[in-house]
Image: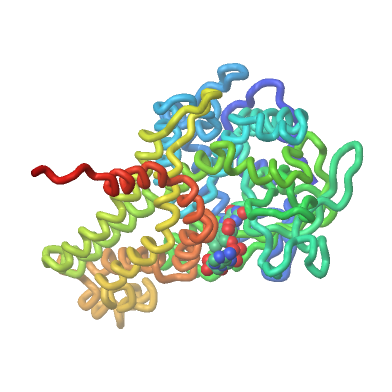
Amino acid sequence: MTTNAARETRVTGTLPLRTGREFLADLRRRKPSIVVDGEIISDPVSHPAFKQGAYAVAALYDYAAAPENRAVMTFKSPKDGAPVLRAYQIPKTHADLRDKRIASTKWAEMTFGLMGRTPDHVAGFFCGFAAKPSVFAAGGDQFARNVVAFYEHLRDTHAYVTYAIVPPQIDRSKPANLQEDPTLYAGVVKETDAGIYISGAQQLATGAVYSDYIHLSCIHPLRPGEENYAVSLAVPTDAEGVRLYSRRAFPLGATDAAEYPLTSRFDETDSMVVFDNVFVPWEHVFAYRNLEVCRDQWWKTPAHLYGNLQAQARYTTKLRFLLGLAKRMNEMTGNDATPPVQVMMGELASYASIVEGMLNSQETLATTDEEGVLWPSKTALYSVMALQSEINPKMIDVVRELTGAAMITLPSSFKDFDNPDTAKDVERFYKSGKADARSRVALMRLAWDFIGTEFGNRHQQYEKFYGGASFLVKMNMFRSFDFKGAGELVDKALNLPPLAD
Ligand SMILES: Cc1cc2nc3c(=O)[nH]c(=O)nc-3n(C[C@H](O)[C@H](O)[C@H](O)COP(=O)(O)OP(=O)(O)OC[C@H]3O[C@@H](n4cnc5c(N)ncnc54)[C@H](O)[C@@H]3O)c2cc1C
């Protein structure tokens, strides 16, 4: 049950900036129900599956709270002028959007782009919702008031929200209401004067074990008959009846942080969220049994654009890290000056620069609508997201190609350096022309953890699907592209004036 009372109730003024220590203390006070390896646990901070991830999030809060980072990481709450996370700023100008991007990049650099659903991701969605309350008002004015009030509450308590907005893959050939049990997919099962009750499951809430709230909704198109699943609401992660089924926790297999420097620190976990008759008070409901509002919240507000600006700032950072790793590995193997290797590095750098260029274009091509709301460029965002599922594996493959066996031909562990019988060989044969054996092995283990481990492979799945399957993102691109302008060029070519005599 919720114990984090200060953050749970409406705040009348803004709380002081949350530190990492406070974040961890809040996480400890809460008692979420998390399933891992046949156990139900309630203290992720103490469990080896989640502990280091919790500390990685705490470090983000500490960074934002540090006085020297305030200007970059915070803005003044419109409520009382107190500093609040930049992640909750509703951008009004291009400069605001730039500031949001820089704040997200600073956080992304702290995890090398390896934690996707940090507190700035879903915060962006709520900024977008609050920027366009009229979309929610289409279901009733109270829903517009609810979403704005909840956004302000998140902002002024520096809260961390994650989301589960995709139905489980139980049987996609049938709509939710025609499944063998209509409570398989998360939906409304009861309504009272005080609120509603939700039962069923929704995938796949990355970071949920660390978050204060889970946003439950559905981004897949819903059809008449599926009204019970057409909701948008928030529940505290520790609400009674919420259970998080975490996928395999990779840190449990990362026996030594030196061997698995990334797995051991940055596993944000992904959870199926199961709701068992969970009560949601009306004030936390933003769309209720309304197919249009449930759809329009994503596409008629800038929520999807603001949230994914963070995703692209993170991805850009991660690609910079990948380029750095590849370059350093080439230096270690002595191939760095080889022209064909430089050509391949140039190819990698081209992809990374395109992604970064499109991130910047989201800002520079942003437009303001008739209500004064700033919309980052859809085409700049969706073109990268649509191709990310192709670019990313290609880039990883180029790095694999470049490194040959370098990430595999390594001692069984760093212990081989400590045994006097083996140390001499290990020091001698695992060194590089540029570095001693320990440094070379450390770099190659880092690269393998990024690319080849279970953690590294999960990341490749993440980059393919974090923003939806690519056929859906390509449809977004289809809807956003200026085909009219393109067609006008064709008309012009079909109506060329006669050739000059
Ligand atoms: C690591 C990871 C983290 C994630 N984090 C989150 C999160 O934090 N919150 C959240 O809500 N979700 C999250 N997701 C879930 C993500 O949103 C979904 O995986 C994504 O929307 C794709 O949906 P799906 O997995 O159900 O795939 P499906 O929709 O089942 O698609 C799988 C494949 O089936 C084929 N296919 C299916 N239908 C069609 C069709 N109509 N036309 C053409 N081809 C089709 C395509 O090849 C497609 O790639 C995450 C996913 C991953 C892998």
Q: Which residue is drawn at 40% across and 46% down?
A: 109
In the displayed structure image, the side of residue 471 where residue 214 appears, left or right: right
Which of the 4 image quadrants contains residue 42? bottom right
Q: Which residue lies furthest to the top in this view?
A: 80
Q: Where is residue 482 in the image (x, y as percent from the top left)?
A: 41, 43
The residue furthest left is 501
Left or right side of 436 for 368: right
> Who's the residue at 64% across and 46% down the image?
211
Q: In which quarter of the image is the C terminus?
A: top left
Q: Please give the name of the residue rendered at 40% of the width and 26% of the height, measured from the top-left corner.
A: 95
Within the displayed image, which quadrant is ligand 1 positioned in? bottom right
On the image, the x and y values in percent for residue 474 come to 47, 56
Would residue 266 appear left or right of 488 to someone viewing this image?
A: right
Q: How far across and how far down the image is residue 478, in percent?
A: 47, 51
Can residue 370 be seen here? The reply is: yes
Residue at 47%, 61% in the rendered image: 464
Give how far across and how far down residue 414 sits, in percent: 37, 71
Q: Would you say 97 lies left or right of 246 here?
A: left
Q: Which residue lies furthest to the front in this view?
A: 501
